[in-house]
Image (spheres, rainbow, N blue to C red):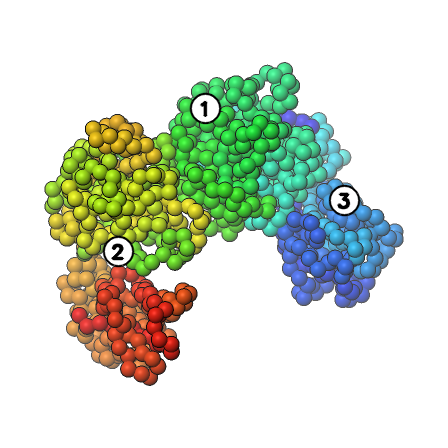
Amino acid sequence: MIRLLLLLCFVAVSALADDVALVRVGETWRYFPAAAEPSGGGNAWSQIAFDDSKWLLGQAGFSAGLGTEATQLPEMFGVYVSAYFRKPFVLSDPAQIKWLTLRIDYDDGFVAYLNGKEIARRNMPGPAGSFVPFNAPATSAHRVGLVEEIDVRAFAGLLAPGTNVLAIQAHNSSLKDFDFVLVPELRGNFTRGPFLQNATSRSIQIIWKTLAPADTAIEYGTNSTLGLTLSDSTLATNHVATLTNLAPDTAYFYRVRSAANGQIAVSPVETFRTLKASGSLSFVVVGDTGVGSRAQYDIAEVMRKAKPDLVLHAGDVIYPSFTYTYADTRCLSVYGPHMKNVPYFFALGNHDLYSGDGPFLDAFYSPTNNVPLAVHAAERTSPEHYYSFDHGDAHFVVLFAPFLNQYQLKVDDPQHRWLAADLAASKKPWKFITLHHPMATSALHRFDDYNGNGIADRTDVLKSVLPLAAKHGVQMVIAGHDHVYERFNPTNAVYPIVSGGGGVGLYPLAELDATSAQIWIRHNCARVTIEGDRLLLEGLSQTGEVFDTMTIYRTLPPPKTFEAAWHTPVIESHPADDNDGNIYGQRFDFAGAPIPTLPGQFSNLGQAYVNNDRANVYVGIEQAMINPDNNIFLFLESPRVAGVTNLAQVGNGKIDPAGEGADGLDFLVNLSFTNFTPSLGCVLGDEWADVQSRSFVRPGLATSVGQGIFRLDAAISDVPGARFQQFNRSPQLGGVLGEQNANFIEIAIPYAALGNLQPGDTIKLGAVVGGGEFDLSPARQARQLDASFLGASLNGSGTGPVVLGGVSVQLAVDPDPDADGLASEVELRIRTDPNKPDTDADGLPDGWEVTHLLNPLLATADDGAAGDPDHDGFANLSEYLAGTNPRDARSALKVQLQPLGNQKYRLSWPSVPGRKYQVQAASSPFGVFADVASTNFPVRANSAVSIYEEDLSASLSGSRFYRVRLAQE
């Protein structure tokens, strides 16, 4: 092995070859389960021209039995002993391929062909070149994981310009052999890499391997002409070149070259970017990956498309054990297309140690720590087991924390002392710790006690890591180990994160941690983006979907007046229907720019939004993070209503949930306001509370604090017309039973409740989070308050005096004063009248006509009220009133009926907010329909779907038919 750090010179090299991976793991093959010989006779199936279009498609590798590979052959056992595989690949210049390697993991035997000619066989009967029938068993067993690198350079002359085919017939040892595996890869010139390691703002290492001992050279420069070369004539198979004196945050081009015995192999030109000395950044976190599954390949592609500056791997890189032979097929070849351009930094996991740490340390070239070698020897660690580096505005620490019976990080041990000194020395505003073992989890490893001390291992890790992390301003401690995605509320302002679903099989929920904010049982990686004082965490699924987000703000921007957006978010009014306090499918749909909040020690209010329309002001909180003994207090000031400067005179000061209630506002006397006089106060934070409840009890509190929207007066009066929704996910497509914290909150308050507030007015908002501690003494009546807040300022925390300053928000001015659905600027462009909702006076608003491709300037034919462009028998005016589409005959006002059990039914129908609807019933579809006798009707819709529930348990037998009609205004 050679580690290069040599002089620079200028040199020219021969033309580059094609990609070094001619056939890479994870690519799509055609395959044929062999219950008979493939068509064509003999080995015709291995020829380039063979028609394999009727063969199955599958992603390599392939396995049966206990294999974890991407494509499973579950029917193989007892049915067929072999399968045939074909992979075409395109090569533009075969002359550039100097060395050729077949890397293959197999169980039990195979014959490989290149363009119809045999190039290798293992454990198969007959001499090389002889025909092997489909039903011939392998002559001996071969254990999976003993990956071979077979030198097939003698067959490089078979390669042709254009399409080539690698074909393999793979055989099990018998029909009764339960396991089968085939994971092939064909490499040109380089058996590994090139890939990047140990990147800094001024240097980087580039690693590759060759089949035969060869010299080492790398060309590089800041453009594709390269120009600089680093070289060494010493022959080696492992090549490690260290480029130094690079410029920070700069794109470089490079290609590697190795020569031996007159053969010169050259890689394609690739690029990398040095790390930043300061500034914005992004990175991806993944853990628990290397099983060769479809999920691993999918997540690898998601990470590449996420375009991070770097990747952090939280350990358990390879399963079941990190071995020399698995290093490529389950890691370096999987991530190779990304690692040649982006540096990866790895932590050791427990599976990475089952074969010792040698294979891991051989494969990767990590930064090192400064702990003396003698200390490492005594601790059975190495300088690469734990380390740190900087990128942009962030400092990263990678710790050694596998199973605690393999190694335990303890307070005041060498790694702990190094960590304390390292964090203390860093001046970066953002700090991250990555390690394998989590300090919080709700999945299967929650109850582990591998060191046998009677304490959960997660607690041991927390006790070792959290105090230092909190002391030195670490924002996140990122782990793997449990095969889920989970993030937690802050503990002492530190956020534990678990991203352990990078490819391996997933774990179920074991016991929900009290501080868990979100847990998803799905394959994942996580992307972190930092811009200045804002951090955004995104959970990315196997398809690249962003399924979860979280924001952290370090500081607030300078005081300013924020602008509300003119928008009407959907705030559902029908009951929860997902058995977890939420409405299936509901989503947080506020518009406009977010208002930042500052997090505290145990909570984070995420981001806030203010929207308004002609009748209401809407306030939304996105991705709040609170614990079961917390709740959110939100306050609103209107310039048209007198407010309060403190809560001393609010309520009766008694715990009386059956009386006045809303006791959360009774015991908040320690909170006062500066430059802020709110008249309304909201008690929020529970997804089971979507209607006013003065006696509501949070699951972690003995005291009822209530939930709802209240006036800050002596009686804590209700606010007429106010509505709110609280839910756990957006979109709400299922949650975690037993979890009640609201992560998304939407409230609507009528202008009339705010002194006839008007668009263009400026309001003020503020919010704080109440903790689990109370001082209920008459003299104090105080609540513990965290340091997290929405507002302009917050002074104080705990049960002592806390002063909150509100943030100013100017409500949006109506962009559509004639309320026809078209903004004035649009009306001027299309020549409708911005002051008339119906320019052509046909009874159809201009905006509705434009939306449905009708001419708002014509009142005749299909464009007028009597028109029927979809020929469904309903005129445009009727379709407008019903909220249906005049150009779609299938669009109609229809009632959907859903049985709820026990003779209860839910009726739903599409509705237009603001319109009134009446449900009617009859005993037959041709009978006389009568209004349903309910005080709910006629009901004015406030969302795109209206719902009514009917209880027929006490009704007489017989059929019942329903319809809905528009009610007369």
Which residue is tagged 2? 568
Q: Is residue 911 left or right of residue 904?
A: left
Q: Is residue 331 left or right of residue 488?
A: right
Q: Secondary structure at mark 3?
A: loop
Q: Secondary structure at mark 1?
A: helix
**Disc 1 versus disc 3: nearer the observer:** 1
Q: Secondary structure at mark 2?
A: loop
Name the amino acid type tagged 2: Thr
Which residue is tagged 1? 468
Q: Which mark sits nearer the N-terminus, 1 or 2?
A: 1
Mark carried by residue 312: none
User: Of 120 and 831, which appears nearest the observer?
Assistant: 120
User: Of 638 and 195, which appears nearest the observer?
Assistant: 638
The local crowd at label 1, few if under 14, some if 14 to 19, many if 20 or more residues have their Cα within 10 Å, is some
The location of residue 857, given as percent across then percent down, is 20, 72
> The N terminus is located in which quarter?
top right
CB under 8 Å between discs 1 and 2 = no
- In space, the residues marked 1 and 2 are separated at their CA atoms by 46 Å
Name the amino acid type tagged 1: Leu
CB under 8 Å between discs 2 and 3 = no
Which residue is tagged 3? 143
The location of residue 11, given as percent across then percent down, is 61, 32
